[in-house]
Image (cartoon, rainbow, N blue to C red):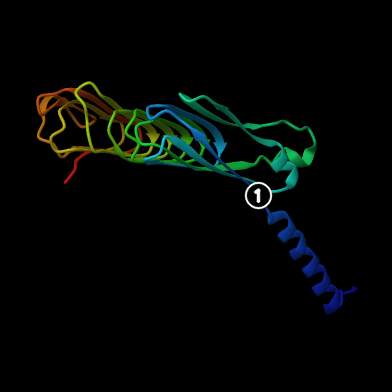
Amino acid sequence: MHHPSPLRFLSVLAASLALAATAAAKSAEKFEQTYPLNPDGAISLSNVNGNVQIEAWDRNEVSLYAEKIASSDDGLALTDIKIEHTPAHLSIRVEHRKNLRFWTLFNRGEVCFKLRVPAHASLRKIDVVNSSVTVRGVKGYVNLDSVNGVLEAEGLESGGHFDTVNGSIRASFSQVGVHDRISLDTVNGSCSLTLPENAAFELNADSVNGSISCDFPIKISRSGRRHLTGSINGGGAKVVLDSVNGGVRIRAAK
C-alpha cells in the first residue's frame, strides 16, 4: 500500500485550509447618508437578514448607516438598498435580486442598519425576518415586526405594537397616555413590559405555556393560570400581552 509522504500531506492540508479560509471570507460594502425629516415624520424599513438599531436624537434628519455583507462579491451585488424619501416619510427597503447561477443560490447577503431619527418621529413599520431590532428614545408610535429575532425598545412615550414569532420582547415606556395602545405578541419567547408607576391602563395578558406576573396593584376582572385581565390606576390606555411559549411580566418602573 502506498502512503503519501509527510510533505505531500502538509501540502494538501495547507491547500484545504486555504480553500476553507476563502469560503469563509466575506465581502462588505458600507453606505452612509443623511435625509431631512419633519420632527413628526415617519420611518419604515423592510429587511430580511441583518439586525436593526434605531436611536433618537435632537436633529430633524435621519442619519442612515448600513453595511451590506455577503460571502462573495456576487452575493453583495445582488443585494440592493432602495430608498424613498419625502420630508414626511423615509422608506428603506432591502431587495435581493434573483440569480439562477448555482453558486448564488445560497449566497444571499445581509444588511445591518444603524439609524438616528428625530426624537418625535414615528416608526411606521420596521419589518424584518431573520433579525433583531433595538430602539431607544423614540417618542412617536413604534411598530416592530420580526419572524426570527428579539425586539427591544426603551424610552418610548406614544404606544406601540411589537410582534415576533421566535424571540422575546422587552419594551419600556417612560410615559403612557390615556388613549395609547401597547401590544406585545410572541409565540416562542417571553414578553416583558415596563411602565411608569402612575400609568393608568386596562390590562389583558395571556400565556399558554408560561407564568404571568404584574407588579402593579390591579382591580381584577378575570384571572387564572393563563389569563390576567383588569384595571390599573383607574384604567385608560389599552395594554395587551400575549405569548404561547413564554412568560409574561408587567413591571413598574422604579
Q: Is residue 8 above or below residue 62?
A: below
- Residue 248 in percent (x, y) is at 27, 37
- In which image quadrant can residue 179 be found? top left
Picture residue at 74% right of the left edge, 57% below the top: 22
Picture residue at 10% right of the left edge, 29% below the top: 233
- Residue 83 in percent (x, y) is at 58, 30
Q: Is residue 101 visible?
A: yes
Quadrant of the frame with the N terminus = bottom right
What residue type is disc 1 on? Answer: Ala
Which residue position is annotated with label 1?
Answer: 28
Q: Is residue 119 above or below residue 41?
A: below
- Decide: few, some or many residues near mark 1? Use Cα within 10 Å; few <14, some 14-19, many ≥20: some
- Residue 173 in percent (x, y) is at 26, 37
- Residue 157 in percent (x, y) is at 27, 33
Q: Is residue 214 left or right of residue 244?
A: left
- In which image quadrant can residue 210 be found? top left
Q: Is residue 208 above or below residue 25?
A: above
Q: Is residue 46 left or right of residue 183?
A: right
- In which image quadrant can residue 7 be found? bottom right
